[in-house]
Image: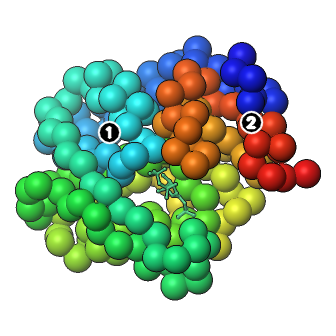
Amino acid sequence: MHKDVLKVLLTKEQIAQRTKELAEQINKDYAGKSVLMICILRGAVLFFADLARLLDVDVRLDFMAVSSYGAGTSTSGEVRIVKDVSQPIEGLHVILVEDIIDTGHTLKYLKRLMESRNPASLKICALLDKPSRRETDLQGDYVGFEVPNEFVVGFGLDYAERYRNLPDVCVLKPEIYGGK
Ligand code: PRP
């Protein structure tokens, strides 16, 4: 275990198993359809790569990068598009892939933005969901795990840009992020 990690919350085996289940559900739901999967950089990248490999429907991959204006929990929830998708999404079956739904502001904003572009359908897939932190009515359509309100890193999630490469989802030692 990494020296800064307090405990492992979800092992890579648990994540792999759940990712497989989500992929099976998506394969079933989108059978015969073409899907555009959009990775919301950067946290979702590991989950996205694993999920994409398990899909057997016709799938295209694209990427978006966003950043919150000001503090992450700003009430407006407005986010800045740092990198947009590289193709029109009109008429496509779109799945936005995230690592975590926290307050829900990021995805609420993105959902509204993407819906204005008239996709055939729009769903949200997130590896983790932290419902105790929610400040919006945003809900995931495909959710891997509910997690408690703890500082989680690994499998794409960072603290100050570190720990994204840890293979498990872990809880960081409070002294690392200045918690008690
Ligand atoms: C994280 C995560 C979501 C967002 C969720 O991104 O990937 O995009 O925060 O929070 P919310 O539900 O409160 O809006 P972050 O800004 O940390 O960027 P990153 O993906 O590059 O780590």
Front position among marks 2 and 1: 2
Numbered label attached to residue 171: 2
Question: Up-down: is 176 above or below 166?
Answer: below
- Residue 142, percent across and down? 47, 44
Question: Is label 1's Cβ within 8 Å of ligand 1?
Answer: no
Give residue 40's position: percent from left, percent from top: 35, 51
Q: Secondary structure at mark 2?
A: strand
Placement of 17 over or under 45, stated as above or below: above
Residue in the image at 28% along x and 64% along y: 82
Residue 51 shows up from this direction:
no
Q: Of the residues under marks 2 and 1, which one precedes in the sequence? A: 1
Colour scheme of this structure image? rainbow
In the picture, measured across the screen, residue 14 lies left or right of residue 56, that is: right
Q: Which residue is mark 1?
A: 29
- Contact? badges 2 and 1 (CB < 8 Å): no
The three-letter amino acid code for the residue at tag 1 is Asp
Q: Is residue 109 above or below residue 45?
A: below
Q: Is 50 situated left or right of 174 in this image?
A: left
The reply, left or right, for residue 60 in relation to residue 98 is left
Quadrant of residue 168 within the rendered picture: top right
The amino acid marked with disc number 2 is: Val
Structural distance between the alpha carbons of marks 2 and 1? 33 Å
Mark 1: few/some/many CA within 10 Å (<14, 14-19, 20+): few
Displayed quadrant of residue 104: bottom right
Residue 116, x across and y down, in percent: 23, 76
Residue shown at 83%/44% (left/top)?
174
